[in-house]
Amino acid sequence: MAEHADEIETTNDSLVEKITEKIHRDDSSSSSDSESVKKTKYDDDDDDVKKHHESSSLKSKSYRLFGREKPVHQVFGGGKPADVFLWRNKKISASVLVGATVLWVLFELLEYHLVTLVCHILILVFAVLFLWSTVSKIINKSPPSIPEVRIPEDTLLQFTSALRIEINHFLQMLRDIASGRDLKKFLAVVAGLWMLSVVGSWCNFLTLFYMSFVVLHTIPALYEKYEDEVDAFVEKAMMELKKQYAVFDDKVVSKIPRGPLKGKNKD
């Protein structure tokens, strides 16, 4: 009986050892599987990060319209005017556009003159102020107060200095174009002025100004929305224009006689 009990005990011990080994194997296999899954996930995340960096670097190196390096909002100054032009605040942008449209309808379609409009507005303002002052005396209340316009001297000086710098920069640019140093820029300016003269012959100054205003309120916002598509299309167009200009330069521009160089004049 004792021997039989010892055999049963050894059998139970062997079974317990087998079960324990199996549990350890399952744990090790599950842990190895989880580690492999985590490693695969980390590798996928690293691949996604690398792809994102590569795409962002390619996007930064891709062609941008007019060779700009800043976002469209920064090109327009990055302040409230940029928000209006790019429709960041739709209510303000829509109000400005509606106001410009109303003025264009008054002056262009209804043929309302500027002096007449200003006089009618002043008559209305004076009538309202007169009635207000009369009623305030009758009911013993304070008359309407007209605010004073106060412009700080420093702000006015800064604005004048900035305007002077911009005017001088514009005049310097005109001198550079007129000197003929850059023939491509000279031809582009002449072509642009000719196109502007053609458009100006179709409509008056007010309509041209209104059209420019509408373009500034629509084209930049649409360009910012479809920036990548437009840049890719313009890049292809610019490559084709460069090819055509190279042909034109080889056949026409290069054959135009030019004056002596500055070095020869000094000698």
Image (cartoon, grey):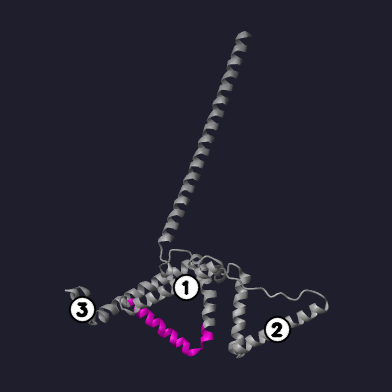
Please name the residue that numbered disc 2 is placed on. Answer: 126
Seen from this angle, which residue lies furthest right? 139
Which image quarter is the N terminus in? top right
| 30 over 240 or under it: above or below | above
Q: Amino acid at mark 3?
A: Pro
Q: Please name the residue shown 60% across and 9% down the image.
A: 3
The image quadrant that residue 58 belongs to is bottom left
Q: Is residue 139 left or right of residue 209?
A: right
- Pick the front one: 253 or 131: 131
Q: Amino acid at mark 1?
A: Leu
Q: Please name the residue shown 60% across and 83% down the image.
A: 103
Q: Is residue 78 left or right of residue 186?
A: right
Please name the residue that numbered disc 1 is placed on. Answer: 163
On the question of residue 244 being in view, the answer is no
Marks 3 and 1, how far apart at CA? 39 Å
Q: Which residues are magenta?
A: 184-208
| 112 over 221 or under it: above or below | below
- Pick the front one: 51 or 140: 140
Magenta-drawn stretch contains 186: yes
Q: Amino acid at mark 2?
A: Phe
Please name the residue that numbered disc 3 is placed on. Answer: 260
Q: Is residue 19 left or right of residue 189?
A: right
